[in-house]
Amino acid sequence: MRRVIAGTVTAALAALALAACGGGEKAGSGPVALQFWAYNEPSGAFRSAAERCTAQSEGRYKISFQPLANDADTQRQSLVRRLAAKDSSIDIMSMDVVWTSEFAEAGWVAPFPDDLAAKVKKESLEGPYDTGTYEDKLYAVPANSNTQLLWYRKSMVKGEPPKTWDALIDAAEKLPKAGRIEIQGAAYEGMMVWFNALVASAGGTILKGPQESNIDATAERAADIIARLAESKAADPSLSSQKEDQNRIAFESGSAAFQINYPFIYPSAAAVGKDFQKDIGWAPYPAVEDGKPVRAPIGGFNFGVGAYSKNPKAAFDAAVCLRNEENQKVAAAEGGLPPTIAAVYDDEKFQKDYPFADLIRKQIESAGVRPETPAYADLSLAIATTLSPPGRVKGKAALEELKQKVEDALTSKGLL
């Protein structure tokens, strides 16, 4: 009898311990505990989405928000270290759109079930949906997209805003004061974004395929535009260390007439003052050549499910909830993050709150997607460090150095 009682007590204690540890979707009762590792979006839109989806799950799961750093390179480093160690605490993660190939190839992110993938595809704009796919499978649902516009101060820029890079630099240099163009010139992903958009707008591509370089005259033209701005009076003296938020701050301080940046700068401008926000105009991303198609950057975050999650079914459902219409509208209104769900752009209230919605959608649908390759991290770093500080290389010298650096990146054996 004592043995039976002891065995019963031991089994009960073991069951309690398993439940306390969150031992997977079949363990115990109550909501499944999901950890959502995400970019600490300044407006709090991702955190509030986790709270709403928890409430809407009717007790099925509880999402705990785990903030990642604001810098994309640091976010990736944090996730890679954990995923390489097969960390099961990563149930859902925010992924920069350029990480899909790398994470899928490494086996760090799980493919979505076919039924959920079909639902997401039906709702989504084509460009953002494609950023979450690898080898025809959906590995990350598009949570928000992003693209850069040319922003300008109406009080400083009279008439139509410039349409090309050369015209933009010319116009800025002619302004009597505060004629700077704010853009990302530091040796990080922002430089890769700039260079890729220039190459694509010149009619080229950095790669022919996942492992094949395609550096040609369009890359030389792109490097020359970067160098021309860097050597002009329109360049910020801190261009070589500038990132998105430094651009925003300089623009808000009145020291710049133009900036190339993402829509997050618009809700931020309201905090400076309504008059300041009213003074902001927006225009399409500048063309490389007048009359040629513009291939603006496409960015944003997708939500993937960790390959080592103990609760994948709940995590897949929660990831789809986190990117639903309601949460995308909140992220757009409060954080300036462009939606990926087509129906949101047709909403009249959204169009009123997000007055540049039509231009954003147009640019997203014709954007210059960054190269899709499992070696993307090495490729991006190679290009950013070759071109920064801006103006370091141009002409034929830039072309030859970029060719060599891209080849080296594609044959690298390790992750940086």
Image (spheres, rainbow, N blue to C red):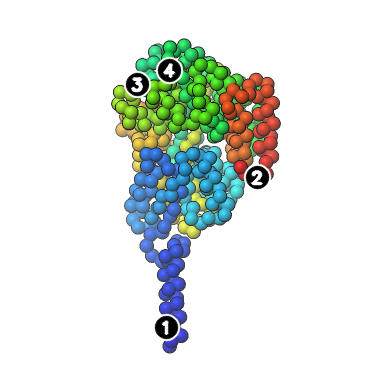
Q: Is residue 133 visible?
A: no
Instruction: Check disc 2: other Cα within 10 Å, few if <14, some if 14-19, many if 20+.
Output: few
Residue at x-position 58% and y-position 27%: 389
The answer to which quarter of the image holds residue 226 is top right
- Tell which circle, 2 or 1, labels the residue nearer the N-terminal end: 1
From the image, state whether disc 2 or disc 1 is nearer to you: 2
- CA separation, marks 1 and 3? 77 Å
Disc 3 residue type? Asp
Up the image or down, 162 lies above or below 13; here it is above
Up the image or down, 34 lies above or below 355; here it is below
Q: Quadrant of the N terminus?
A: bottom left
Up the image or down, 230 lies above or below 89; here it is above
From the image, state whether disc 1 or disc 4 is nearer to you: 4
Q: Does the CB distance between marks 1 and 3 fall below 8 Å?
A: no
Q: Does the CB distance between marks 1 and 4 fall below 8 Å?
A: no
- Tell which circle, 2 or 4, labels the residue nearer the N-terminal end: 4
Residue at x-position 56% and y-position 55%: 86
- CA separation, marks 2 and 3? 48 Å
SS for dot 2? loop
Disc 1 residue type? Ile
- CA separation, marks 2 and 4? 44 Å
Disc 4 residue type? Ala
- Tell which circle, 2 or 3, labels the residue nearer the N-terminal end: 3
Disc 2 residue type? Gly
From the image, state whether disc 2 or disc 4 is nearer to you: 4
Residue 5 is labelled as: 1
Residue wearing tag 3:
279
Residue wearing tag 4:
178
- CA separation, marks 2 and 1? 56 Å
